[in-house]
């Protein structure tokens, strides 16, 4: 429970401005599949989310293969590609960069539910209090 809460505390979107005025939406952004997997495990086992409400979104450079990236993140997250939102495609810079850097882009994980968002925030507060006492 602690690790999922701490991941969201560090990597999650929390403010209204960051979340486009929707504080009831859980949103986590990372290019690290390990972070995404751990947080999804936390959402599934501790927060007990409904799978059909999960959404994924890619942020990739224009020189990357969108279909390949979607399939990669779908396999990692076990979220069907049909539940992915329109990707954010950034123009690739002419500066030479490693071909492996962000090969599959950045993954945006979303889950819209006010009760689950409030449960997550409550869980985070409890973990913070526990850590302050130790």
Image (tube, rainbow, N blue to C red):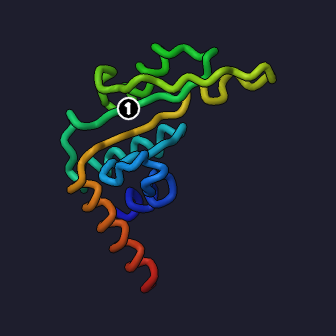
Picture layout, residue 8 above or below residue 124: above
Q: Is residue 22 above or below residue 5?
A: above
Q: Quadrant of the N terminus?
A: bottom left
User: Splitting the image into 4 quarters, where does residue 112 fall?
Assistant: top left
- In the image, 99 versus 114, the foreground residue is 114
Farthest residue, direction bottom = 133
Callout 1 environment at 10 Å: few (<14), some (14 to 19), or many (20+)?
Answer: many
User: Mark 1: which secondary structure?
Assistant: strand
Front position in the image: 105 or 25: 25
The residue at 53%/33% (across/down) is 106
Residue 84 percent coordinates (x, y): 35, 26
Does the image show residue 38? no
Q: Residue at x 39, y 79 (%)?
A: 129
Answer whether residue 114 is visible to the viewer in this image.
Answer: yes
Tell me how many marks there are. Answer: 1
Establish if 130 lies above or below 110.
Answer: below
* Residue in view at x 29 percent, y 55 percent: 117
What residue is pinned by disc 1? 56
State the residue in front, 103 or 93.
Answer: 93
Vertical comparison of 53 with 74: above or below: below
Q: Position of residue 42 (x, y in %)?
A: 32, 52
Quarter of the image holding residue 115? bottom left
* Quadrant of the image containing the C terminus: bottom left
Where does the image place residue 30, in percent across and percent down from the top left?
51, 41
Name of the residue lying farthest toward the right: 95
Taking the image as shown, residue 13 lies to the left or right of residue 55, namely right
**Residue in the image at 46% along x and 24% along y:** 87
x, y (%) of residue 39?
A: 38, 48
């Amino acid at each position: 429970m602690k690790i999922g809460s701490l991941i969201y505390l560090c990597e999650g979107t929390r403010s209204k401005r960051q979340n486009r005025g929707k504080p009831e939406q859980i949103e986590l952004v990372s290019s690290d599949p390990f972070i995404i997997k751990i947080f999804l495990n936390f959402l599934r086992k501790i927060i007990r989310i409904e799978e059909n409400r999960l959404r994924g979104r890619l942020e990739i450079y224009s020189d990357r293969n969108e279909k390949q990236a979607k399939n990669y993140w779908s396999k990692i997250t076990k979220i069907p590609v049909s539940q992915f939102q329109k990707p954010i495609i950034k123009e690739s810079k002419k500066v030479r960069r490693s071909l492996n850097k962000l090969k599959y882009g950045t993954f945006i994980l979303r889950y819209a539910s006010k009760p689950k968002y409030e449960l997550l925030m409550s869980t985070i507060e409890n973990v913070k209090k526990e850590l302050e006492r130790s």
